[in-house]
Image (tube, helix red, strand yellow):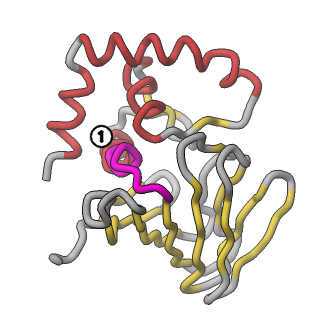
Amino acid sequence: MPNPKTYYNPVNGEYARIIESSEDTGGEYSLLEVSLSPGGGNPLHYHTRFTEEFFALKGNLGLQYQKDIVHLRPGERKLVPIAIPHRFFNDSTDEIVFRVMLRPGQPGFENFLKTMFGLVNDGKTITKNQIPKNIYLIAVMHNWGDTHLANPLFRLISPMVKLFYRRAVYLGIEAELLERYVKD
């Protein structure tokens, strides 16, 4: 297998690589490796289609799991079941490295990762939470990544986002994103 491509997100100081794709594992899992700069992390969210298992490799990986905060040291792991609000973060002064396994494999999330990092680098997102500037981009990212922000406003607008996703497909926006950011 060739060396995986590294994707960079300058907003949160995150480098990510897809070590084993869903395609590589016959859909069993997707395996990602993440390097996270001090202060980096993502917002509280949950998934409805897959579990995530975090494996700390270097440094202490901060995880918020529902309302609890845990720190995984190298060699430790934590499984996050479907629909459990969580986030990862680096509250140390050193870079941390961890792996995360998505089960079952998630080709949509792999597309989400590549595209979201591309959108951030192209200046097409706003805020430190990296929300795309365009409702159609939000809809495609939501569909691919199955990443639901854990706040009441997002739950309220989520059904409308599904309608925008269908329109994004119709307008060819999803195909444009695949061509620009996913196609290797």
Local secondary structure at mark 1: loop
Q: Residue at x 66, y 66 (%)?
A: 79
Using residue 90 as the reference point, say whether residue 37 is left or right of it: left
- Residue 178: give x, y in percent of width and height: 21, 37
Q: Residue at x 67, y 59 (%)?
A: 80
Using residue 60 as the reference point, say whether residue 36 is left or right of it: left
Using residue 38 as the reference point, say whether residue 121 is left or right of it: left
Q: In the depicted view, which residue is nearer to us: 176 or 143?
A: 143
Q: Residue at x 44, y 31 (%)?
A: 143
**To which residue does mark 1 refer?**
122
Q: How many marks?
A: 1
Magenta region: which residues?
103-112
Query: Which residue extends farthest right?
Result: 67
Q: Amino acid at mark 1?
A: Asp
Is residue 59 part of the magenta span, yes or no? no
Using residue 106 as the reference point, say whether residue 151 is left or right of it: right
| Displayed quadrant of residue 22 | bottom left
Q: Quadrant of the N terminus?
A: bottom left
| Displayed quadrant of residue 165 | top left
Q: Residue at x 60, y 52 (%)?
A: 42
| Displayed quadrant of residue 52 | bottom right
- Residue 38: give x, y in percent of width and height: 60, 70
| Most frequent secondary structure within the magenta stretch | helix
Is residue 111 part of the magenta span, yes or no? yes
